Amino acid sequence: MSFKNILENWSAFRKDAEAGGHHKYDHRWGMAINLDVCTGCNACSTACYAENNLAVVGKDRFEKGQAMHWMRIERYWDDADRQFPERGASFLPMMCQQCGAATCEPVCPVAATYHTPDGLNAQVYNRCIGSRYCSNNCPFRVRYFNFYSYYETWAEPLNQQLNPDISVRDKGVMEKCTFCVQRIRASNDKAKMENRAIADGEVQTACAQACPTGAIVFGDTMDPNSAVNKLWAKHEVKRGDYLSKKPKVNAEKRGYRIFEELNVDPSVMYLERVREEI
Amino acid sequence: MSGFKVNRRDFLRVLGWGGASTALVGCDMPTTVTLEEGKEDVVAYFMPEEYVIPGVGVWYASTCTQCAAGCGIHGRVREGRALKLEGNPESVINRGKTCMMGQAGVQAHYNPDRLTQPLMREGGALKPASWEVALKKIAEKTASANGDRVAWLSGAVSGHQAVLINDVLNTFGSKQHFVHETIHASVWQAVARDMLGDAQPVLRMDKAKSILSFGADFLGTWQSPVHFATQYAKFRSGKRGVLIQVEPKMSLTGGSADAWVAVRPGTEGILALGIAQNLVKRGWAKGEVPAKLKEVLAKYELGMVANATGVAGDRIQRITAALKDHAPSLVLAGAPVEGGENGYDAVSAVMLLNILLGNIGQTIEPAAQFAEARMQARSGGTRGALEFSKLAAAKKLDVAFISHANPVYHAPGFMKMKDAMANVGFKVVMTQFPDETAMQADVVLPLYSAIEDWGTHVAAYNGGVATLSFQQPLMEPLYKDTRGFGDVALSLLKQRKPKEYAAFNDYYAYLKASVSNMPAAVAKGDKNKDAAWNALLQKGVLETKATVGKFKVNTATVAAVADVSADVQFPYRLLPSARLGLWDGRHANSPWLQESPDQISKVVWGSWVEMHPVTAAKLGVKSGDYVRVTSAQGSLEAQAYVFNGIHPEAIAVPLGQGHQEYGRYAKGLGVNPYAILNPVIEKKTGEVAAYATRVSVTKLDKSARLVHMGSSDTQMGRKLVSTIPATVYRRTEGEA
Amino acid sequence: MFYKHVCKLVLPPVLMFVSLLLISGAPARAELAVPPGVTPPVGTHAGEDVPQPIEFPHDIHVNINKINCMYCHTYARRSKVAGIPPTSKCMGCHKMIATDKPRIQKLTEYFTKKESPKWKKVHDVPDFVHFSHERHIKKFVFDADLPVENVEQVCGLCHGEIKAMTVAKKNKPLTMGFCRRCHEANGGPGDCWKCHK
């Protein structure tokens, strides 16, 4: 897209964006995470390590902030100034939000990260040159860079556990949560082989499948009958209208997206934590 | 992602790579763009089963053995390798879900530090030996042993493994099977037995509208965490239940509490009696309150209780009211209460609340016990190791078999397990790893991983449905010189009773014969035993006949709870807190679990000392400073983690680290708080009072960044985790 | 060099010349037919000779015995990988057929040892490329109603005229440009993450 093209067709691009981006989506994968039942147990995070060939970096590199946890549970103390945290801890499962208007995408100099027609924020490893612009531009801090050739650290026979459906990333490559794209593609292929549409619940991310309390619901937000879409609708969180001036959140509903004010149109909706006054 | 599940014994003859473009991703040359021709090998199957398709995963049902909860799992196998574990939806324990430890089951299997051949002690050192030689040695050394001079120490076992252990001991005429588990609920079970007439009552969190938990970390480490987490999800949905967690240090469950109440460590029982008194006083107690009980409760007035526990009187009243308002309720007691020197009395006080609140029969139901007694779960606490160490130290043991346990690491330091074991004539250790106990053995027999072995499991806590859960190999053994536990136990039996066990070539044959004779296994008029067996393995679980008991409620055992004494020399109480992940230390050799942050402190790869900011200020300590924690038994050093989720009189050091052996990922990392426990025994149950040790803390002249996840402890005003009051929730969706 | 070897074993000298024409395809011979309605991917590659543990003659199996590709590479329509036939499958025929030939005797040796030959991979794509055989077979054979006996035309799009070879040789480039041109011409997906992940 040339600069001249941008200037000449700006209003058209803008309208496109308001209508949901330049894509004709065939699916839009999304999540709903109920923070009221998330217990912060780390099952999702470990399941992600097991599914996605995540590197274990060790203590020293962890200290430098080089951990590769695509799915991490943030823990915040909201009562840090009080004598005791009387409302417990605030746990936040944080992974790539697969933004509809992702800030990582336009800064990639080689288009290694881009938006797929099924609403995913793709990272193409063989295209990535490791400029790390995307990670610097991500407000959620969910992009992880391979500073080392971690594949060398899988001691035999630990490497036999590696999932052959997804690449093992090499040094110099950015990586992040993919919504378990290998599972989506496998289910998609299976559905196509059987000449049918992909059913709701047929594809689950590793984190959603493991989650002991079912706090994570994954599915196609374009499918009106999907569990995730029903949740989005129930909690009145809408995608795509991120350029409008309308209030983004209905205060009476629990649904919200993190950093809504940045207009990045995340594909992950969180449901507020509830606390009883005792 | 379903794939299809088929189960057969000998499913892969050749561990092959299926043979095409993607099979070797990541394993051989992940960095090299291999466009050359003829550089990579492709090995076809020799004779594949019909259902094995290269490039397509096959799912097998099995049972997780990462802890004793007995969750059902499905394992994904591709090209002969087990790749991923998921929950088995058929299992009533976990309903298709898993915890982080279950997810890491594959790492216990592929761990690079596994034992690959038997070891025998020769001239003081352990040297490799063949199975024939090792088994011959065992036969020689045990030939003349008999009676109670033979003992077996194991972790929690059940199913046919428990039967075999029992049978081996029977051949010696010994009844000494000791069960040792560091993380246990033995005191809770003892109290439930005495007050309800049922040691393992079913807890219906899904029915409860409020849960008052005295330190029971049911989402993390208490009894059956995944099961309780699935129940908790129901508890929190619809007409949302209220969780009140009372404990001296925030557990994972405490993190999810509506109200987290810090209590002076060791006084939880007093608080429970205070709430009981409040219930009775306000006329909210259900049923007749015996006069003797009223007498016991009389002195637990609000003022006295508030004074002893550090929980304000009005708070106690509010908690009492919440339990009444959100009925039915459920009251639980976990490790910090059970582990006190007054543990039995304190848990009794907690159980009394369930009786006074009318929860018995409502949210607490009688257990449905697995009908075959020999296969029931042998669970236990620390008493098993205590008794074993005493016998060993007194030179009363000629032969000791140790399996499913690592007592030299796990037993508290005061038991001097290593020295005690030196006094045992002959020690056979069956294990998968070069752990601390294996290093003390005379013969070490290397076992299959859970992913390579056969077994059956009966959960100690079964959620009200008695099931037998099957464990079957997901893949061929990685090491040809390892063997299954059942096979080893059968070898021991064959040495002693060759005729009786001649019919069983291996544990598989034994299991199949035994299960096929169980009435439940061939029910529904199924004549074809092979088909029934295959169907069982495919499903993974077998629901069986259960013996459902009846409650006999008894409050006569409720007594006054002794207050904890102060100590000037050792002003703090040590909390050896357990964490989901490393568990009692058995998972310290999993890189994933080491790198997975502690849920509360977010610290990775090491140990830390938790203290309240008030305590830290007194000591001049900030997070990251090294401190020395000293008890009468010894001391340990680690970095401080200062946060306000702990009572100022408590010091918490998590379990799980401090291994001296156990492979590259565990060895030499962090400290083990059990090393400095005082020898305090809870008198009525004989369990080690693990939370009754008093310590002092001194600051050391050393500081470093505490390696942990996340850079900000607060949300800094951003809307990251948003919280709304329950009143709003009730208005918008609470009745849905 | 290879044909010499074959001929010495199998054919009298006169037939040797004829068979060379037949099997290897003389210059005048037409290219493998393209399935109707398909724009074939463009590009050729001069593949190296890849020595295999057994010099498997594709030509005899396909050209003379008319065995369908998917008879041996049976997983192609059911999995992302086409699969190398299991040793037991080879022996299904070769317990009876051509048991006097040295290559078959070598195969029998493997079989009695319950082993599989270590074949060398000829058609390889980088590890970050995920190619699915079943999807291509579905599109070009089953969805296109192509008679299954003509499946070699579809396989040939990427593998070339295997029936003219003994052991397989790579004669298509299998580069991303090669894949992309075909995807564009025949309506395959253009999304990077369909093949890279």
Image (cartoon, rainbow, N blue to C red):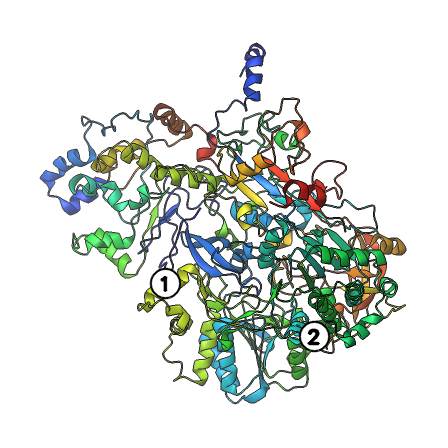
Foreground residue among A9 and A61: A9
The chain holding disc 1 is B
Q: Position of residue B566 (x, y in %)?
A: 87, 68
In the image, taking residue A184 as reference, residue B227 lies left or right, namely right
State whether residue C133 appears in this view.
Answer: no
In the image, taking residue B413 as reference, residue B25 lies left or right, namely left
Q: Residues within 10 Å of mark 1 (few under 14, many from 20)?
A: some
Q: Amino acid at mark 1?
A: Asn
In the image, taking residue A241 as reference, residue B489 lies left or right, namely left
In the image, taking residue A224 as reference, residue B13 lies left or right, namely left
Residue B310 sits above or below residue B731 on the image? below
- Marks 2 and 1 close (CB-CB < 8 Å): no
Q: Quadrant of residue C23?
A: top left
Give residue B687's mark: 2
Residue B310 sits above or below residue A198 on the image? below
Foreground residue among B205 and A81: B205
Q: Residues within 10 Å of mark 2 (few under 14, many from 20)?
A: many
Q: Amino acid at mark 2?
A: Glu
Foreground residue among B683 and B38: B683
Q: Secondary structure at mark 2?
A: loop
Q: Position of residue A228 (x, y in %)?
A: 54, 39
Q: CA distance from mark 2 to mark 1?
A: 42 Å
The N terminus of chain C - image quarter: top left
Q: Mark 2 or 1 closer to N-term?
A: 1
- Residue tagged 1: B534
The chain holding disc 2 is B
